Each structure stands twice: as structure tokens, then as C-alpha cells.
């Protein structure tokens, strides 16, 4: 059973600058700082542990994958806690866990310890944004939620800029200590935040099932909706986790020297801050989050094309600007998280809003495995080719995006599974080869 929203029940709403919005924004700031810190200090930290260039790449991919698996696990755990025990339980528990893990990260002496603590930190980081968005969505009127979510995301993303500045000023171990300290300080500030009345009203109703993760899958319609919410966000983490985090490796393949992946992440997230805010304003103007989502999908696709077609722009600075363009496009992240929170009733809202973005993050290891497999010497044996084919596959799976492009008469060429159907023509009708990826003659003049 999924119950009605608070608006249906006449729950009183609050303003955009309510303490819950401010504290959620500060929480996301610390969350982003800690989430991206490894990507920013990956090279100096692993080099200081005695790894060579090849090991830095391989171990870096392994550690970031383990961190994302931690986010996946934490998304399920904290999502259930959020609906069973309350949103504040998540906000307090998650920040305490990742703050302690970050402090301990400053003492690691080998990659094994590093990986374990990034997993623990990932579990803790999973609850922050989803719980904050859920709390705000239950406190604010529907008309204000998009702007409030954009405000939280825009301010929070500045945590990436702060992480890069700290990396430039301090040793990588000190950067972890700072992240843990910021989390513990925020923990004290959260004592002034109260639970939403919408949630407390259903706690009194003992017959309502809350926080049952399996409820997403015991109903076909709900399961499809949940999976679609996850698929919407996957392209964002292909960009963040592959193209930008390993931008130094792509730069070498493009013949560009001296690209700092930490600086690329900073440029990307500064642009994401503007993208989040712009996406919120556009969705309010158009009175449609879906239309705003597709607009930003288009922006992302454009900069993906430029990233590869221009080969990084030919210089380190141009590479950073392309990463910024990708970041602005991935401003759709806040929209899909807000949309996900709105799709489910109060008894499942935290579980959805926390687990969905973390499932997206948790799929990064699979994206990296696909990327690693494609660049193997027996397949493409080329780093760049493997990357764009990976991205092509990620975007090609999104039927709604293909639908949007075709309705608007926009030609495209994407890898589409042969057992899927395009807007007007079944790909299987062109090449009956199940399991293979083919392009649709409808949109590809070369087919």
C-alpha cells in the first residue's frame, strides 16, 4: 500500500529558507566533499603509498568501484531506516558513519585499508542527499520543491570546489581529516532540525507498511517505475565516474599534457551547481520536470560529442571547459532525484529517494567493467574508442531519451539493444540478432 501525500492531507508547509533546507544544503556540501575527495586526491594518495602509474589507474578504478558498492548497500539500508525510523535517523546516522570513516582514511598505509574505509564511507554517504530531499519535499509545497532541491544541490556541489582547494593547500591525509571534522560539526547543527509532520502522521498508523524495500518489486507497475527512475540517472555517473575522474588518462590519449583530474572535477562540479539551479528554474517555468530533464539530456549529449570529436579541445584548459560543459548538462541529477521522491507515497518515499540515486552510483562498477572489457586488446584495444562505445551503450538504453529526440525530429546514432523498440520501428525488424547492438536505419543514413 502506498499512502497519499501530505498535500492531500492538508499538512502545513514551510518557506524556502527554513532551517531544514539550510541544514540539508550544508549536509550535501559535506557529502559531495567526501564523495569526490578520493577522485580528486586519487593520484597523490596512491603514489604516496608506493604505486606506479599503471597501478594508480588499476587500483584507482578498483577503490572507486568499492566506494560505489558501499553507496549501493548504504542506499538500501538507510532508505529502509528513513521510512521505518524517520528521516532524521538517516541524517544523523549517515553523517556520523562517513565522518569517522574519513578520519580513519587519513591513517591508511596500504590499498587494502584504503578500499575498506572507502566502502564504509560509501555506506555512510548514501543517506545524505536522499534523506535531505525527502525531508524538504515533505515540508515544502509542491511549487517550491524544485527550487529548494536546486538550492540544496547548487550549494552542496560547492563541496567539490572546496575539496580541490584543500588538495592544493594540504597533504591528502589532512584533506580526509578536514572532511571528517566538517561532518562532526554539521552533526551538532542538525540537533535543531525536526521530523516532518507528514512522516509522524503515518507513524501513528500501525497498519501501514513502511520502508519495505521488497514492496518496489511485488507490484509490476511499481517495479517498472523504480527501475526507470534508476536508468534516468546512469548517464550522469558515466560522465562523473569515467570521463572526468579519469580525465588525465583521456588527456594523454588525446595528446594533451598536464591535466589534473582533481581540477577537472572542480570545473565539472562548479558547472553542475549552475546546472542544478538552472534546471530547477526551467522546470518551474515550464511547469514540467520531465521537459527540463530532456533539455539537459540534450545538453549532456552535445558535450559528450564535443569531448570526443574535439579530442579534449587540444589543451588542458579546453579540456577543463569541456568537463564544465558536461557538468552543466548533468544538472538534471537534482530533477531525477526529486521526481523519484515524488513517485512514491510517504511510507516508501525515503526508501526511494535514498536508494535510487545510490543504485545509480552503485552501477558505476558495472560501467567501469564494461569500459575495461571494451578496451581489452582482444576487443578495441583503444582507451578512447572503448569509452565512447561505453557512453553510447549507456545512452542507447534510455528509451525515453530516444523518444524525445525522435519526436523533435533530431537525428541520432546510438547503440540500441536489438530486442528493444524505437519510437516507430523495432530494431529487431531490421536485424534479428538477439543480444547484439545495432543502429536503427530510421536514424542512421549509413545503415
Image (cartoon, grey):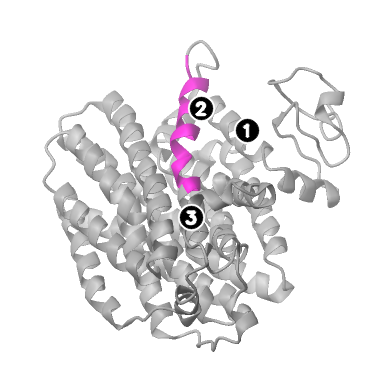
Residue 182 percent across, percent down from the top left: 23, 67
Span colored in magenta: 359-376
Closest to the observer: 267 or 109? Answer: 109
Disc 3 from disc 1: Cα separation: 32 Å
First-in-chain label (1 vs 2): 2
Residue topped by disc 2: 370
SS state under label 2: helix
Residue at screen point 67% across, 38% down: 397
As helix, strand or loop, the secondary structure at mark 1 comes to helix
Residue 401 in percent (x, y) is at 72, 47
Q: How crowded is mark 2: few (under 14 residues within 10 Å), some or many (20 or more)?
A: some
Q: Is mark 3 on a helix, strand or loop?
A: loop
Query: Quadrant where the N terminus lies?
Result: bottom right
Badge 3 is on which residue?
A: 212
- Disc 1 marks which residue? 393
Instruction: Look at the picture and state if 373 lies above or below 356.
Output: above
Kindly indicate whether the residue at mark 2 contacts the one at mark 3 (C-beta within 8 angstroms): no
Amino acid at each position: 500500500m502506498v499512502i497519499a501525500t501530505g498535500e492531500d492531507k492538508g499538512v502545513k508547509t514551510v518557506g524556502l529558507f527554513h532551517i531544514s533546507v539550510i541544514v540539508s544544503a550544508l549536509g550535501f556540501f559535506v557529502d559531495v566533499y567526501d564523495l569526490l575527495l578520493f577522485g580528486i586526491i586519487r593520484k597523490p594518495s596512491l603514489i604516496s603509498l608506493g604505486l606506479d602509474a599503471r597501478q594508480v589507474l588499476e587500483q584507482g578504478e578498483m577503490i572507486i568501484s568499492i566506494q560505489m558498492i558501499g553507496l549501493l548497500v548504504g542506499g538500501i539500508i538507510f532508505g529502509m531506516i528513513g521510512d521505518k525510523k524517520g528521516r532524521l535517523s538517516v541524517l544523523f546516522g549517515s553523517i556520523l558513519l562517513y565522518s569517522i570513516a574519513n578520519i580513519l582514511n587519513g591513517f591508511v598505509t596500504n590499498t587494502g585499508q584504503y578500499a575498506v574505509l572507502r566502502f564504509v564511507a560509501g555506506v555512510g554517504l548514501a543517506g545524505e542527499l536522499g534523506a535531505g530531499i525527502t525531508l524538504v519535499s515533505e515540508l515544502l509545497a509542491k511549487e517550491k520543491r524544485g527550487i529548494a532541491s536546486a538550492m540544496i544541490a547548487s550549494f552542496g556541489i560547492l563541496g567539490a570546489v572546496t575539496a580541490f582547494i584543500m588538495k592544493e593547500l594540504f597533504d591528502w591525509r589532512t584533506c580526509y581529516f578536514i572532511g571528517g571534522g566538517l561532518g562532526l560539526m554539521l552533526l551538532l547543527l542538525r540537533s535543531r532540525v525536526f521530523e516532518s509532520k507528514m512522516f509522524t502522521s503515518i507513524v501513528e498508523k500501525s497498519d501501514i507498511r513502511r520502508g519495505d524495500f521488497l514492496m518496489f518489486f511485488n507490484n509490476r507497475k511499481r517495479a517498472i517505475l523504480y527501475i526507470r527512475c534508476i536508468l534516468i540517472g546512469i548517464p550522469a555517473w558515466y560522465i562523473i565516474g569515467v570521463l572526468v575522474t579519469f580525465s588525465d588518462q583521456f588527456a594523454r590519449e588525446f595528446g594533451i599534457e598536464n591535466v589534473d583530474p582533481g581540477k577537472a572535477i572542480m570545473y565539472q562540479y562548479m558547472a553542475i551547481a549552475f546546472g542544478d539551479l538552472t534546471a530547477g528554474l526551467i522546470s518551474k517555468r515550464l511547469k514540467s520536470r520531465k521537459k527540463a530533464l530532456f533539455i539537459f539530456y540534450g545538453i549532456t549529449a552535445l558535450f559528450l560529442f564535443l569531448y570526443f570529436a574535439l579530442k579534449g579541445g587540444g589543451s588542458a584548459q579546453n579540456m577543463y571547459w569541456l568537463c564544465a560543459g558536461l557538468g552543466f548538462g548533468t544538472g538534471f541529477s537534482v530533477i531525477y532525484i526529486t521526481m523519484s521522491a515524488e513517485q512514491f507515497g510517504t511510507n516508501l518515499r525515503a526508501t526511494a529517494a535514498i536508494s535510487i540515486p545510490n543504485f545509480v552510483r552503485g552501477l558505476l562498477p558495472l560501467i567501469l567493467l564494461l569500459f575495461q572489457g571494451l578496451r581489452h586488446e582482444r576487443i578495441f584495444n583503444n582507451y578512447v574508442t572503448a569509452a565512447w562505445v561505453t557512453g553510447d551503450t549507456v545512452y542507447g538504453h534510455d528509451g525515453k531519451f530516444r523518444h524525445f529526440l525522435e519526436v523533435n525530429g533530431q537525428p541520432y546514432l546510438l547503440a540500441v539493444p536489438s530486442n528493444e523498440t524505437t519510437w516507430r520501428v523495432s530494431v529487431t525488424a531490421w536485424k534479428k540478432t538477439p543480444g547484439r547492438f545495432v543502429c536503427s536505419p530510421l536514424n542512421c543514413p549509413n545503415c
